[in-house]
Amino acid sequence: MSKDITLLKDLCENFKKDIVDGPFGSNLKREHFVDEGIPVLKIQNIKPFLIIPKNLNFVTPEKYEELKRHSYKQGDIVMTKLGNPLGASAIVENIDDGLIVADTVRIRAEKIDTKYLCYHLNSPITQDLINSQQKGATRPRVKIANVRELPIYAPKKEKQKQIVKILDKAFEAIDKAKENIEKNIQNSKELFQSRLNEIFSQKGGDWEEKTLGEFYDVRDGTHESPKYQESGYPLITSKNLKFGKLNYDKIRYISEKDYVNINKRSKVNIGDILFAMIGTIGNPIVITDEPNYAIKNVALFRVDNTIDSSLFLKYYLDSSFVINKMQKEAKGSTQKFVGLGYLRSFPINKPKLNIQKEIVNELSVLEQETKKLEEKYQQKLENLEELKKSILQKAFSGELV
């Protein structure tokens, strides 16, 4: 196999022109972008085996001609040399010819099958090597020189095509299996949502209709932007409410003075519910641990009775019946939001406490079963991703054919 190992640059006619990264410095800045024109591919547009043509930037034809050395065309491979995953590579398809940005690479290798090379670049062998060569602590990246020097297992073209045929067939079967699993995950979520909507659309009888503000103490966090610091008290925003939990990734900290001042208005207690008011509206969370944080642009629902009362309201706020209505009526053009007055006046039907408890018991059991199913399906998805990596590993270790 060693005799078939070739450096990537040697698979090009002229590697200095065929393996290039994007323009640096002032050559391509935000002010050069226009509403329509020649597309510019960014890191966010490049995933393994896939170009995502969303939120594209554009330049004028004149700017494109000026920076043509950094252009791509149909059939080229583009790669990320910054970010996670590092070295993600995809063949350019279904998008007009354009430019790449600084932290991406365009590869035009004439002496190797393009699809074979794309599989190779996304394989564990190449990915591990690229990641071992990354530099930089906060924003690790790989140099263009390292990309050009990547070792590529390049057997004869007939064998390359044979390997591509096997990989295409295997990946098609794996992707079909993943699609079915993802449908099962969606079906389990829809089943739970269907029961939520069925329960909370009830009216009359033992159910009393009022507003959230009439039933609960509804507040919100600060709207100011306190001075941030490296440590101190966490400031929870809508971005930190995810999947029924507080997410402390990229959390920002404030001083004790600001923490105390904010909490005069909206101190969070155990049993309260936090609710995102801006961006992705919703994601209600019941607080079960003693809080040591303040909140910003987050609603707080204070529930005076029991944890069952909190969970009842949480399930209500989590129902698509409620969220769809709020999203439809939300204000704002670029970023949707709901105000405190809107939340206080939002309608809710609520039964007596004993019925709330029965509903919470039923939904808790159903929710746990749904989560177990989702975890099972998620494990299957992860197993399929590992199978892909295993097949790629064998393909470019000379073990597949």
Image (cartoon, rainbow, N blue to C red):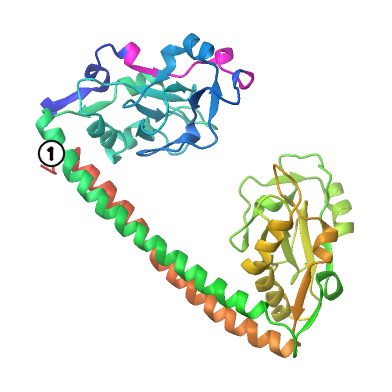
Kind of residue at badge 1: Gln
Residue 310 relative to residue 220: left or right: left
Give coordinates of residue 36: x percent, y percent. 56, 25
Residue at 10%, 42% (x, y): give it. Answer: 401
Residue at 17%, 45% (x, y): give it. Answer: 166
Residue at 68%, 67% (x, y): give it. Answer: 322
Give coordinates of residue 51: x percent, y percent. 41, 36
Sort mark 1 into few (<14), some (14-19) or many (20+) by Cα contacts within 10 Å: some
One can see residue 108 in this view: yes
Give coordinates of residue 8: x percent, y percent. 26, 22
Which residues are the magenta region? Answer: 16-31
Nearest to the observer: residue 191 or residue 13 = 191
> Quadrant where the N terminus lies?
top left
Where 357 sits versus 102, above or below?
below
Nearest to the observer: residue 101 or residue 255 = 101
Q: Quadrant of residue 79?
A: top left
Where 125 sits versus 350, above or below?
above
Q: State the residue position of label 1.
A: 162
